[in-house]
Amino acid sequence: MVGLVSATIVGAALGCSVNRTAADTPESFEQARERMVSEQIEARGVRDARVLAAMRRVSRHEFVPFEQRAYAYEDRPLPIGYGQTISQPYIVAVMTEALELDGSEKVLEIGTGSGYQAAVLAELAAEVYTIEIVEPLAERAASDLKRLGFEKLHVRAGDGYRGWPEAAPFDAIIVTAAPDHIPQPLVDQLAVGGRLVIPVGRMFQELVLITKDEKGVRHEDLLAVRFVPMVGEAEKKR
Ligand SMILES: C[S@@+](CC[C@H](N)C(=O)[O-])C[C@H]1O[C@@H](n2cnc3c(N)ncnc32)[C@H](O)[C@@H]1O
């Protein structure tokens, strides 16, 4: 498994050209997406067939700013404005796989960003709730998700630290910004039998999987990652 996965802004696209095939003809978005899944995700060990199929279906290029479209299927995060990023495709796949979704779940995401991760979740679960603290990002994601026909999705602008109590409990929770501690309200809103995946730490973080059963809560470290920090109430509790 790869040691460190970055989900931070990587700066300006450095002289990247549109992907080219061996014959030096431009790749279509579909071809680039297929290559993204096979070379960046399957080849690194993601095995869940439903996750792989969802990553093959969702058009990542629809969730990035127009000038970033040519890079949409590259192995890295991309800037989406407001100092935020769409996460690296591989990390989206790893976090989604860790949730072990079977299609029946109600899922909460903290950190909507572009809406791409929410779209992947919507392909795999019964209902998705997602919260984004930067209001214009929440609005843009909601409008993109609607335009692309994603249903079963509820987008809210606000601080996700306290979760979405009116819709709790959730069978799965995914956090895509890093606090330096695990927000207790999210653990409280996890259903018994549920799974929560969250990057925890400051400069560098550990991706932590939390599972809940009748006996209590268990933590498991999955891999080292790098995400943008969770802001708002999470910072005040440091
Ligand atoms: C790495 S980006 C998320 C990428 C996103 N999941 C996607 O698919 O594009 C992290 C996002 O978390 C948001 N965020 C940070 N702190 C937050 C908080 N307390 N509540 C909700 N969103 C937060 C940021 O504004 C940013 O958009």
Image: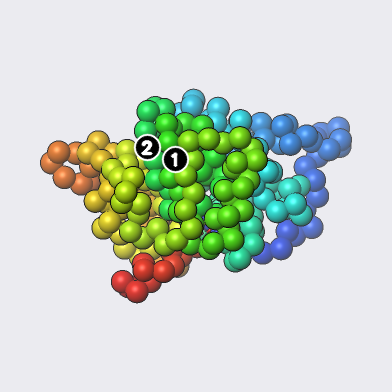
* Residue at image coords 59%, 42%: 145
Q: Foreground residue, 168 or 94?
A: 168
Circle on res. 128: 1
Q: Which is nearer the N-term, disc 1 or disc 2?
A: 2
Circle on res. 30: none
Residue 170: quadrant of the picture: top left
**x then y, percent, for residue 236:** 34, 74
Label 2 lies in ligand 1 vicinity (Cβ under 8 Å): no
For residue 77, above or below residue 81: above
Say which residue label 2 marks: 106
Residue 85: quadrant of the picture: bottom right
Which amino acid is tagged 1? Val
* Residue at image coords 38%, 71%: 235
SS for tag 2?
A: strand
Which amino acid is tagged 2? Lys
Asked whether the beta carbons under mark 1 and mark 2 sit within 8 Å of each other, the answer is: yes
For residue 37, above or below residue 74: above
Regarding residue 126, the answer to whether it shows in the image is yes
